Each structure stands twice: as structure tokens, then as C-alpha cells.
Amino acid sequence: MKRVPWTLIVFAAGLLVPLLGSRFYTFVATDIVILSLFAMSLNLLLGYTGLVSFGHAAYFGIGAYTCALLMKHANAPFVPSLIAAGLMAAAAALLFGFFCVRLTRIYFAMLTLAFAQIVWAICFKWNDVTGGEQGLPNVPYPGLDWMGSVPVLGGFRVADHFYLCALSVVALCFAGLRRIVDAPFGRVLTVIRDNAERAQFIGVNVRAYQLAAFVLAGFFAGISGGLFGIFNRGVFPDFAFWTKSAEPLIMTILGGMGSFWGPAVGAAAFIVLNQQITSYTEYWPLTMGTVLIVLLFVFPGGIAGTLLGLLERGRVRAGRGGTAAGAAPMVKRNA
Amino acid sequence: MLEVSGLSKAFDGFTAVDKVDFAVRRGEIAAVIGPNGAGKSTFFNLITGHLKPDAGRVLFKQRDVTGAPPHRICLMGMGRSFQRTNIFPKLTVFENVQAAFITHRRRGSNFWSLSDSLYRGETEALLGSLGLADQADATSAVLSHGNQKQVELGIALACDPEILLLDEPTAGMSAAETRDTIRLIQRIAAERALTLLFTEHDMEVVFSIAQKIAVLHQGRLIAEGTPEAVQQNPDVRRVYLGERH
Amino acid sequence: MFEFSFLFGQFLGGITAAMFLFLIASGLSLIFGVLRVLNFAHGSFYMIGAYLAWQFVHLIAPAPEGFWLAALAAAVSIALLGAIVERALLRHLYSREELYQLLFTYALVLILGDMAKIVWGTQQLSVSRPPSLAGSSEVFGVTIPHYNLFIMGLGPSIAVGAWYVLQHTPLGRIVRAAALDRETLGALGANVGWVYTGMFMAGSFLAGLGGALVTPIKSIVPGMDVEIIVEAFIVVVIGGLGSFWGTFLGALIYGQVLSFGILIFPRFSIFAVSVLMAAILIIRPWGLFGRPLK
């Protein structure tokens, strides 16, 4: 069976959104695209390396502030600013990750959270640079005027142009992530996730690889944060607050961390759900908490995991008349 | 090949390994025996870097590796298996062994190739020689205990070791499986000119294949020598064989 | 530079803050030590404890020392809430990966936070000090409310009391065994499930008590749950998770650094705490009293 180029298909489908001509759809699609990168970057740690980071918002926030500061105060062009956002986030991930990977499991989670709070505190208090509690409003859009002179694109709004730009950046990042997990490097990460003790004795410097994964995840989170700051037309300390770190975790669990696309599916579900629920009630956290509990108890594999499980079961039943009924369908690996 | 001197380790005041001196020459098949809790696994973990000794030295190929991290010791040419089967449960059998090829040949930091196609031939050949070819695509967690032990052996061998440390390679196996496993290990050790250091509770196995035996009791080395010499040793008869009969 | 009395005042302020942190963090650490669950909702329990204390004070307003009864009732209610959460939900997640437990407790944070808003609204609430401790004394030129003195005494008392129970009673032996592993515990003939429930209740009780007792000093606001939990995390990271005295020391250090940090870097006192935490972790990755855990 030949591998389906999902990245391309999703990207192509995404390109069509502005044709719907709805301001609202473009808005939601931009939100989904940017936050799915945030969730996917986290899954490099969560699903592939087996590291539970509860401080991923730190790198999202650093990316957002870096990009916003460069574009707003230094009038820097978009592309270098965004790359700088990724690199700053990666640098912070290197510094914090160095300490975090010395710890395991829950201790790791706590320390990532504690470091994220440092970042939040800096964003919150360093008025001269970050604008403190007020944040940095009015982050400019990238200069995408050239799109106006391209046929078809010319008829779109500025927000549509930015959407296409974000979509392209995110698609590139997804291709990069896919490459990382399919390369030997990615295989080593899954080996560490499965059994870190054994991994050491096939010659893996576990901490070095964990740190590398942490830095890469930080980089992509930074890119995502940079994009989000522009999309949101402003950057605020809340971007780095610890509860923000829970969002990509919830998205990942919602979509399923056992598959490459799970977190993106989860991000889409999360955002659509948010849009729906907030139009009825202001108690979105209450609803989300309840959904999360149902998910944890009833569908621990998330949307993707549950679908894959159903598919597998269907295939077993059709193929072998239920010979393997006793063995629960296993998600073979991160496909 | 491997030389330890004055090796000691205590946990919370309990001395698990107490000033052990021991050496294995290249090409030798050596066994460490002793009753449960004699410190065999700790002894192995001190050699392989999983534990840091309180005192003493470990020399591997004339180089001091005391307290070196496990991955570095492994890359120098030491392979090991664990007492409790220690594999990558969610990966397939093929991926288990292939991963060891990838990491041991230092291709792990490679981003520019696809891991699926790496070392296919080597992995298939090794699985074939272990009799695991049929199970290559099975998730390793669902294999039988005996097969999992073989996977673990495959992982260790993919690291192309010069010395192989096996901690209870036949633990939990039936008599027939034990016989097969021992034959397999002997064959592979001969083919690859491996140095072998293993622990084993089955005395028949130990005395049939080991050329040299060390006896640990309460963390201390109480006897060392050829199987005959060890069998005759009065201390060994008292503390070890005496307990069994 | 600074007058002695001023510095002494800062010092006492740090101690008072530390004792509250200790109440919260010790419960967190106790639950983690036995159940191996990091309870994000611990901060929510603290907040609900505060709201309940306010509610009970108003219910029994005429009684002169009603505050004490209200505080106790709030803490007991939180312990019961803890018992329900543990028995009904949490225990089904013990066999799962930590991530599921973490997200479960986080879901509770979301739910409890909104529930508190629904019940008590978003305005600030406050409780006045009980009449018996409404006065204050002057020590070395510093005016200290009696209530703060009481808190400074309560913290160490609870620490010593808990230490005694843990080290010198049969109950403590069971708890210590439980912290090591479940099998040992089963061998002691204890009912593992109820030991876990009991520990979760005890930890929750401390959170509720902390929340109730803080009300005469701080006003009750939404968001105090997610703030305190991070402070408690930093305290246990500094002290070492699962270590009782580590938590005590971590709280003292946190309180002092925060209180003197404000003098040195007025805006960055929280930053000073973080830097200190990083420094400690460079030297001791598992915290001051923590042990490496596989």
C-alpha cells in the first residue's frame, strides 16, 4: 500500500477556505492552523519521546513576543521575525530543557511548568520591553500586498492573505515534523519513549536526544506563537501562563497522541467546540473540563485513536472472522 | 577484556557488592553464580554503567570506564540483556532490532534519510539467525516470553558487541526452551568470537558451558575458577550448593 | 540602608507567607508521596476552602468565634470533596500514564474554577479576623497582628504533628509503606484503596484549611487557585517532592526570597524565586531533600 500524502491533501484543502468568502470561516481556519502547529510541536515530546511537558506555553509565548517585538518596534520583515521567534524559543528550550531532562516523568512535568512560570513572570513584569500586563497590542500584519496583484488572491481580504501565509508556514513545519519523525532521529525518540533504560544500552545518550527533541519542539512552538501573535493582533502575558500549556495537551489527547495527525485533529475539534460552546454559555472551562473527563475515561485514545481502533476491529472481523478478538487492537506505532 | 577491582556498592547501608575483583579474558565464557540476592544483577549494573560504584574500578579493553554512562560503555562494544525482559514493547520485532543497528552505528542523529529503509538486510539476517523471521512484523509486546528474550538477545547482538553480558538468559523458560536458548547462545558466541559473561540459576547450564565461574555470596566473591575447582570449593559447597541439596 | 525593624518586618511577613505555602504544599507533597499523583486541583481545593469559610462565617455570623468553626467546617468539607473525587474518579486512573492523571486533575481545575464563579460570583470577598486574635503586638518595633502570630505558630505545629504521626504511629507506618510500594502495603494487611482515599482526604483537608485560614489576610478572588498551585509547585520542587521537611524548608526559603526579593528587585521578586529554584536544581536536580526516582 502506497503512503497517502496527507500533508499535501490537507494543505490543498486548506487553500480552498478563503474561496468560501466567509470572514468567520477564515478566522476559525487560521486559529486551527496555527494552534495545530502548537499541538503538533508538543506531540513530538508527548507522543514520540514520552515526555510530559506542562510548560510548553513558555516557548509559544517567547515566540509570540519575539516576533511581535521585531515586527512592531524594529519594523523587521515577517519572515526573519518568524524565524527569530523560532530560534529564540529554541534557545530558551535549550536552556530550560538542559535542567528538565535530568529529571523523569512527573518531576519533568513539574519543572517544565516552573520554568514556564518564570517566562510568564518576565512577560508580566518587564513593562519596558513586554508591555507588562497590557501586553503588546497592534502587532502589524506581514506585508502581503503583493498577493493583491495575483489573480484570484486579489479578491481576498487581508485576513485571507494572512491565512494563506500562515497555512504555508505551518505546512512547511508539518513537512519538517514528518521528516523528523520518519528519520532515524525520530525512531530513536520512539525507542526512548518505549524504554529509556534499554535505549541507553543500545548506545543512546537518552538525555541528549530528549534535549534535542525539547529544543525542536520549542522551535515549532515558537513559530506557532509568532503566527498567533499576528493573528491575534496582540501579544499578552497569558500566552505563557501555565494554563495555556494545558491547551495543546488537551488538543493532543482530544485528537489522539498515538498518531502523527492526532494533535491537529484535536486542535480543530477543540477550536470548533470552543466556538460552538462560547456562543451559548460563558462557562467554557466548565464544559471543557467535563468533556476532558469524559474523554479520559471513555475515549483515552482520542478521536484518531478511537477511529483507528474501530478500523482495526473492522478489518480483523472482515479478514479473519474474529480470530484475534481476544487481543485488543493495538496502535502499532506512530504511523 | 574486562577487569574489575575492589568494586563495591551499598544501598542504604546494605552492601550489595563488596570489594569484588574479577577478570574475563577475550573469548572466554564466564559465569557469575550465587543465591538470590547475592548481588549478581547489581554487579552487572555496575559494569554496564547503570549504577555508579561507591569504590573500585572497572576496566573494559584496558580503558577505565568506572562511572561512565551506559550509552558510552555500550558504544565501546559491550552488549547486555536484563534479568527482566527489557525490550521496546510498542515497536515491532523488526523495529526493535533495527533501532539497535541505527543507534549503535551512530545514525540516530540523522535527519536526512528515512529510518524504515535503514539496515534492512542486516536486521533480517539477524532475525533469521535467531529464528524470529516469522515474527518480524509482530508488536513485540504480544510475543511469548521466550520470544521476547530472543528479541532482547537480538537487540544486544545488533550492537555488535565484543563482550556480551547476559543476566539470567533463560529465566522463566521451560526446559526445552532453555536448551534451545543455550544452544543458540553458544552458536552465536562461537560464530562471532564473543566474550560472554552471564548469570544463571540453572546449575546444569552453568557447568556445561562456562569455562570460568565466579561465586558471589552476600555481595562478596567467595570463589573463582574452573567449573571443577568451583565445584570442589568447600565454601561454595557450604553456602551455595549446600543450600540447594 | 534599611532599618532593622523594617527588615524584621519583612522577615516576619516572609514567615507568614511561608506557613500558608507550607500548608498547601505539604498536602500536595503528601498526596504525591503516596499516590504518585500530582494534583493540580489542590489549588482549587484551597480556593473553594476559602469560599466555603466565607460562606460558613456568614451562616453563623452571630457566634463571636464563629470563624474557627467555619474554618474547620470548610476544611472538613474539602476533605469530603477530596474523598468523593478520589473514590469516584481518580482511583480508576492509577494504572494509567501520569498524563491522564495530570489532565484529570486539570479538568477539575477548570470545573471547580467555573463552579466557584457560578456560586460566588467574581467580586472580591473578605473575612474579618476572629475577635480573639484581632489585636496586635509590637515586637522589635514591628506591629504584628496576633492572627499572623497564630499562623506562624500553627505551621510548625502541623509540621511537627504530621512528622510525629508519620514516624511514630502505626498509621504512619502504613503511610510510609504505601509511599514505598503497594505490595508491601498489601503485605501489612492494610486496605490499600482506603489508605489512598485517606491520604487524599488528609491532603485535601490541609488545602481546605489553608484556604480557610488565609481569608482574614487575603481577599478571596477567582484565579487564586491557579496562582497558589504554581507557588506550591515551586516550593516542592525546591524542597524535593515527597519530602515533608523539604517542603517545610522550601516554603521558608520561598517566603524569605519573595519578601526580601521585593526590596532588591521590586518588580522581579517572583523572578528571584525562580532563579533560586534554578540554582538549587543545578546542584540538586531532585530538590534539597528529594531522592532520584525512576
Image (tube, coloured by chain):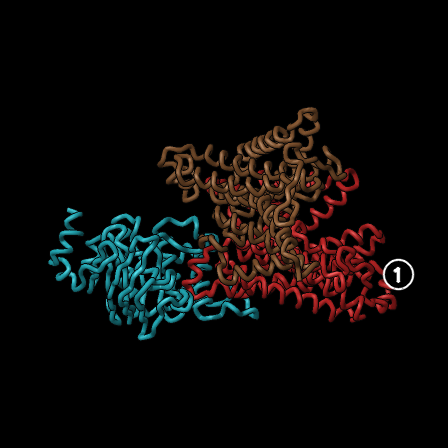
Is there any visible trace of residue A3 in the rendered image?
Answer: yes
Camera-nearest residue between A1 and C152: C152
Taking the image as shown, residue A272 lies to the left or right of residue C148, namely right
Q: In which quarter of the image is residue C39?
A: top right
Residue at 79% of width from left, 41% of height from top? A279
Residue at 29% of width from left, 69% of height from top? B2
Camera-nearest residue between B57 and C8: C8
Taking the image as shown, residue C210 lies to the left or right of residue B155, namely right
| Residue, disc 1 | A155
Q: Quadrant of residue A34?
A: bottom right
Q: Where is residue C147 in the image (x, y as percent from the top left)?
A: 63, 39
Q: Give the quarter of the figure containing the N terminus of chain C.
A: bottom right
Which residue ends up furthest to the bottom in the rendered image? B62
- Vertical arrangement, residue A26 with respect to residue C137, above or below: below
Residue at 63% of width from left, 56% of height from top? C4
- Chain drawn red in the picture: A
Q: Where is residue B101 in the image (x, y as percent from the top left)?
A: 44, 66
Label 1 resides on the chain identified as A
Taking the image as shown, residue A303 lies to the left or right of residue A234, namely left
Q: Quadrant of residue C225?
A: top right
Taking the image as shown, residue C97 lies to the left or right of residue B74, namely right
Camera-nearest residue between C198 and A70: C198
- Chain drawn brown in the picture: C
Is there any visible trace of residue A292 in the rendered image?
Answer: no
- Chain drawn cyan in the picture: B
Q: Where is residue C267 in the image (x, y as percent from the top left)?
A: 70, 58
- Vertical arrangement, residue B70 with respect to residue A244, above or below: below
Q: Position of residue B214 (x, y in %)?
A: 21, 61
Residue at 56% of width from left, 49% of height from top? C251
**Number of on-image labels:** 1
Type of residue at label 1?
A: Gly
